[in-house]
Image (cartoon, helix red, strand yellow):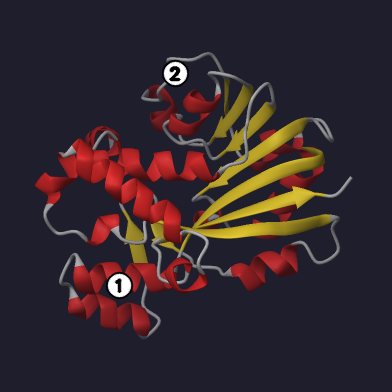
């Protein structure tokens, strides 16, 4: 398990992972001098980044990940899950981050309601989710794994190292979670539409390629046709005042 986490951490340092985080952070509204909650903080990459200019609280259930977390900037790390989330005060955070978490959670609606509860009026919830269509395209184009693509199209399972089975959900599920809450979906954006489909990994180390790819990804992230085929979707919700 420790070796798997070390491999995962090394992968997070690759240029394609750095590009993913750069895109997600760029898509966030300006987050400065805010109280931020990162629920399911993993290796602390986003928590550490936002802690440069914000007061950040991170909650993560995996002690192994916490042991290896990035903490160049000061933030509060809590080991826990929804129970520790329930201990946070009402209306206490300006921004709530929940990236690639709901796919692996059973109590999705309960978690979302807790995130809503701790969010201040006019605050933002940032959810990053896996997009089923994007994974199928990844299997066909980048991995050339046609059998797994067919399996996914037939309702088969997808698994991610260190996290397990990906239980996909879509925007309609999110709409159902917020149906009786005072919160609106402001944007649904695409992340990793093109760059992970490039089979030549060497070119991804080229800074010029990275800059051009960042530019094109940002240009298409809010266009429906491209968002619908991206590997991830980034959902931004705002709590009403």
* 27 lies left or right of 144: right
Q: Nearer the viewer, residue 104 or 219?
A: 219
Give the residue at mark 2: 71
Please say if 58 is above or below 161. Answer: above
Percent position of residue 23, x then y: 43, 45
Q: Say which quadrant the N terminus sits in.
A: top left
Q: Residue at x 71, y 59 (%)?
A: 185
Percent position of residue 92, x then y: 79, 30
Count the marks: 2
Please say if 69 is above or below 201. Answer: above
Percent position of residue 213, x then y: 30, 50
Q: Which badge, 1 or 2, comes first in the chain's sequence?
A: 2
Please say if 210 is above or below 131. Answer: above
Contact between labelled residues 2 and 1, with CB atoms less than 8 Å apart: no
Secondary structure category for the residue under label 1 = helix
- Mark 1, other Cα within 10 Å: few <14 / some 14–19 / many ≥20: many
The image quadrant of residue 206 is top left
Q: Is residue 107 visible?
A: no
Q: Say which quadrant the C terminus sits in.
A: top right
- Cα gap from disc 1 to disc 2, whole angstroms: 35 Å
Give the residue at mark 1: 137
Q: Residue at x 21, y 45 (%)?
A: 209
The image quadrant of residue 199 is bottom left
Q: Is residue 6 visible?
A: yes
Please say if 139 is above or below 202. Answer: below
The image quadrant of residue 70 is top left
- Mark 2, other Cα within 10 Å: few <14 / some 14–19 / many ≥20: some
Residue that extends furthest to the right in the rendered view of this protein: 241
* 122 lies left or right of 132: right
Q: Residue at x 42, y 15 (%)?
A: 72
Per the rendering, the mark at residue 7 is: none
């Amino acid at each position: 398990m420790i070796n798997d986490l070390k491999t995962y951490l090394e992968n997070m340092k690759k240029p394609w992972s750095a590009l993913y985080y750069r895109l997600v952070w760029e898509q966030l509204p300006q987050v400065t001098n805010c109280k931020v909650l990162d629920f399911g903080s993993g290796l602390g990459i986003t928590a550490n980044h936002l802690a440069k200019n914000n007061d950040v609280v991170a909650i993560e259930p995996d002690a192994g990940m916490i042991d290896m977390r990035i903490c160049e900037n000061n933030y509060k790390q809590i080991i826990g899950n929804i129970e520790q989330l329930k201990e946070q005060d009402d209306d206490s955070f300006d921004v709530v981050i929940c990236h690639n978490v709901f796919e692996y959670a059973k109590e999705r609606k309960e978690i979302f309601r807790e995130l809503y509860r701790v969010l201040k009026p006019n605050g933002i919830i940032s959810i990053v989710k896996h997009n089923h269509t994007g994974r199928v395209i990844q299997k066909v184009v980048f991995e050339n794994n046609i059998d797994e693509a067919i399996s996914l199209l037939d309702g088969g399972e997808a698994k991610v190292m260190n996290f397990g089975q990906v239980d996909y959900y879509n925007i309609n599920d999110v709409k159902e979670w917020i149906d009786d809450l005072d919160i609106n979906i402001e944007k649904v954006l695409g992340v990793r539409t093109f760059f992970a489909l490039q089979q030549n990994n060497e070119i991804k180390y080229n800074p010029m390629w990275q800059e051009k790819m960042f530019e094109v990804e940002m240009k298409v992230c809010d266009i429906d046709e491209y968002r619908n085929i991206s590997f991830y979707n980034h959902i931004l919700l705002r709590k009403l005042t």
